[in-house]
Amino acid sequence: MTFRTFGPDEFLFLLSGLQWTVLLTIIALIGGGVTGFLIALARVSSLQWLRIAAGTYIQIIQGIPVLMILFLSYYGLGLAGLDLPPLFAAGASMTVYASGYLAEIWRGCIQSVPKQQWEASESLAMTRAQQYRYVVLPQALRISLPSTVGFAVQVVKNTSIASIIGFVELARAGQLINNATFQPFRVFVAVAALYFVVCYPLSQLSRWLERRLHVGSHR
Amino acid sequence: MSEVIVENVHKSFGTVEVLKGVSLKVKKGEVFALIGRSGSGKSTLLRCMNGLEKVNSGHIEIAGHAMSRDPAQLRKLRTDVGIVFQSYNLFPHLSVGENIMLAPRIVRNVAKSEARNTAKEVLKLVGLSEKFDAYPDELSGGQQQRVAIARSLAMQPKVMLFDEVTSALDPELTEEVLSVMEQLARDGMTMILVTHEMGFAKRVATRTIFMHQGTIWEEGASREMFANPRTPEMRQFVKSDVK
Ligand SMILES: Nc1ncnc2c1ncn2[C@@H]1O[C@H](COP(=O)(O)OP(=O)(O)OP(=O)(O)O)[C@@H](O)[C@H]1O
Ligand SMILES: [Mg+2]
């Protein structure tokens, strides 16, 4: 029995896995971003039932492992008679996962805009929607950038969980190559390096934003 | 006819009654000073006048608008009532010009060029023409407060409310803000101002109200009131506050 060695072809295979990791991250951030934004707004709504509903959603998502969200959407939707491609199940569960965390991050950012900003804009006869649109959200957005980018790093790493349902992203690609080459050290160093190449710049960006956008500064 | 009517207003926070039946009338062009010890209810009264606080009972009418809980009705009132706070509260992400133009543009639906002209006018009035493109964090406290006044004026209010707008400023900067307010008063703006500047109240306010424990304890023409306080509480207050 002969093993392949870890060469350029194998590396290319890892790179194609990385593509799916990045794609899954993008889906999670866009889907989770839109959903999370709406849930964050619901969380600070003046309607009590909406606040409670959004809070419950956040608690549930943050209270269960991402893996369970993945299983629930993969097997749950399967039971419902839907035969889902792994990308769909993985995208859906990553979206749900990201929405729960982004909602909570953004709720904090919205609430950290001083209440005087609300009072000043309210006194200028703005509607609530105008207060959000022109005064509160632009400030919350600036505050949120470092932690949002920081969270994106978590998402990149957590997409590896999707390998469990047979989705061939970077971690799964590494396993497959290792099964064929049996050179675990080489293979997983390469896999780790690829994760690092994506995550490190994001972490740096997050730090840079944090330094740059300290609260109260307009630039 | 009165521009501001406050009738028997009661306001409680929880079980604590902060305003215990306050009534006052302000005619067009009059300047009212609200003075009194900390906690006597001055800010609360002012905030009730633009609906930032909801009254428990009583009636408020400003520039012909009755105070209402209906949001649309309340916004109508607010377009005619400007308020300036102790802490300026400029929008930090917007330039001075944008701060001033925002509400006229989106609330009054004024055309951009017109909003710009108005902004330049009110900035000139407060002596900050050259700061149109500056950002709030590039201005001194006194300059920020004058921009806040300009921002209110750009809505062309009929009544202006000021809540201790110079309390966070050192004496020099206080002067530049007070002189803007004095100019406004001379131009005939109807104003109600909470202040600790007794000299300013005496000189600029046509009438003064001394609040004590949630009621109007004493009211009268400013000069006379400061010269001859009728109540012991007011006498005590004026004596302890002379600078
Ligand atoms: N949002 C609030 N919740 C509870 N109590 C409040 C609130 N706002 C004011 N109070 C209380 O109401 C009373 C009157 O407060 P207010 O701010 O009107 O006084 P003031 O005359 O403006 O005092 P100061 O000179 O210190 O500004 C105080 O006892 C204060 O603690
Ligand atoms: Mg006060």
Image (tube, rainbow, N blue to C red):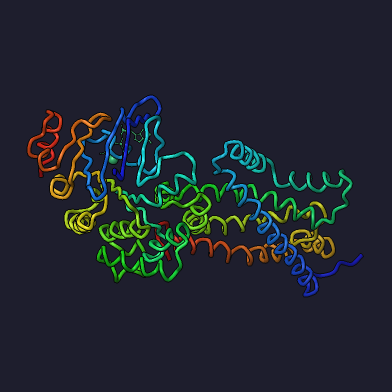
Residue located 46% across and 48% down the image: A112
Residue located 67% across and 59% down the image: A30
Left or right: where does residue A144 sit relative to residue B34? right
Residue B193 drawn at (x, y percent) = 25, 46
Q: Is residue A158 above or below residue B44?
A: below
Left or right: where does residue B120 sit relative to residue A183? left
Residue located 76% across and 48% down the image: A70
In this view, the residue farthest toward the right is A1
Q: Is residue A142 above or below residue B87?
A: below
Q: Nearer the viewer, residue A31 or B93?
A: B93
In the rendered image, the quadrant that contains the N terminus of chain B is top left
Residue B228 drawn at (x, y percent) = 8, 35
Q: Find ligand 1 in the image and state its quadrant.
A: top left
In the rendered image, the quadrant that contains the C terminus of chain B is top left
Residue B161 drawn at (x, y percent) = 30, 47
State the image quarter where residue A25 is shown. Answer: bottom right
Q: Nearer the viewer, residue B83 or A55?
A: B83
Left or right: where does residue A86 sit relative to residue B4? right
In this view, the residue farthest toward the bottom is A8
In this view, the residue farthest toward the left is B227
Q: Is residue A50 above or below residue A30?
A: above
Q: Is residue A127 above or below residue A54?
A: below
Q: Nearer the viewer, residue A204 or B157?
A: B157
State the image quarter where residue B100 is shown. Answer: bottom left
Q: Nearer the viewer, residue A110 or B19?
A: B19
